[in-house]
Amino acid sequence: MDLSGKVALVTGGASGIGAASARRMADAGATVAVVDLDADAAALVAREVGGIALPGDVTDPATMPVAVAAVEEQFGHLDVVFLNAGITAGQSGIEDLDLDGYRRIMGVNLDHVVFGLTAAVPALRRTGGGRVIATSSLAGLTGMPGDALYTATKHAVVGYVRAAAPVLAGDGIVVTALCPGFTDTPLIAAAAGSFRDAGFPLLTVDDIADAVTAILERGAPGECWYVQPGREPGPYGFRGVPGPKGGAAPPSISWEDH
């Protein structure tokens, strides 16, 4: 992957998947802007990759437009946007509902993707095109019992990407979704020991950065790339469902094959 001269913006870039992907993009030659609620951690990653830190709450509709404007002002253009910030619900959302928690997970996992794409599109058009990756999850491709709210947000990201991608493809803007399985990040730190005790394989952040690299190199508009331990990442096959270009989705892996 050669990103020499390119400028990337990564949300949730202060830790986990975001930080690993920021490092990977910087290693490939990109200048990286790190957006995160944790200003100190964002500054550390930005210093490490030779980029800039843009602290902010991605649930605030003003954060992404301000971040995009700051990138354009400092570097003159924007080429890659990785909308990666995410949280878990901490509740099932089926019988008992903590309304504040519900609003928060919807804001981080879904609203910020909408706000981010809306803010990025004019800048990417000015560049002449670019790449947008939104982090969903395997929970965006199948239900995850016990976390209905998280599943709902991630399904929404998949639907949003598949609907938005064909609209933007004509402008040279390729929008894709990243759908990883359980990954060893701070997001699941409290449960990581239980996964290991059960012999359940966890992905590493480098596994996900590998998938991000592959998507940037060859991902097509509207594709939703699954990432699972022991399998090569690739676009999920929505069997029997029209693809984002209006035809049948290209033959690839489908959930029934997992």
Image (tube, rainbow, N blue to C red):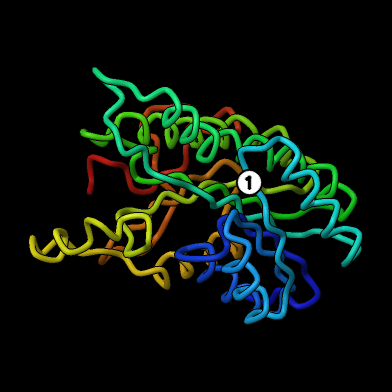
Residue type at mark 1? Asp
Residue drawn where x is 36% and y is 25% of the image: 98
Residue 175 x/y as whole percent: 63, 45
- Residue 32: quadrant of the picture: bottom right
Q: Quadrant of the N terminus?
A: bottom right
Relative to 119, 83 lies left or right = left
Q: Is residue 183 above or below residue 134?
A: below
Q: Is residue 67 above or below residue 119?
A: below
Foreground pick, 197 / 161 = 197
Foreground pick, 234 / 38 = 38
Residue drawn where x is 57% and y is 68% of the image: 41
Relative to 185, 8 lies left or right = right
Residue 206 x/y as whole percent: 42, 73
Residue 256 x/y as whole percent: 23, 40
**Residue under label 1:** 57
Residue 130 x/y as whole percent: 75, 55
Q: Is residue 237 above or below residue 12?
A: above
Q: Secondary structure at mark 1?
A: loop
Residue drawn where x is 63% and y is 44% of the image: 58
- Residue 26: quadrant of the picture: bottom right
Q: Residues within 10 Å of mark 1 (few under 14, many from 20)?
A: many
Residue drawn where x is 51% and y is 30% of the image: 159
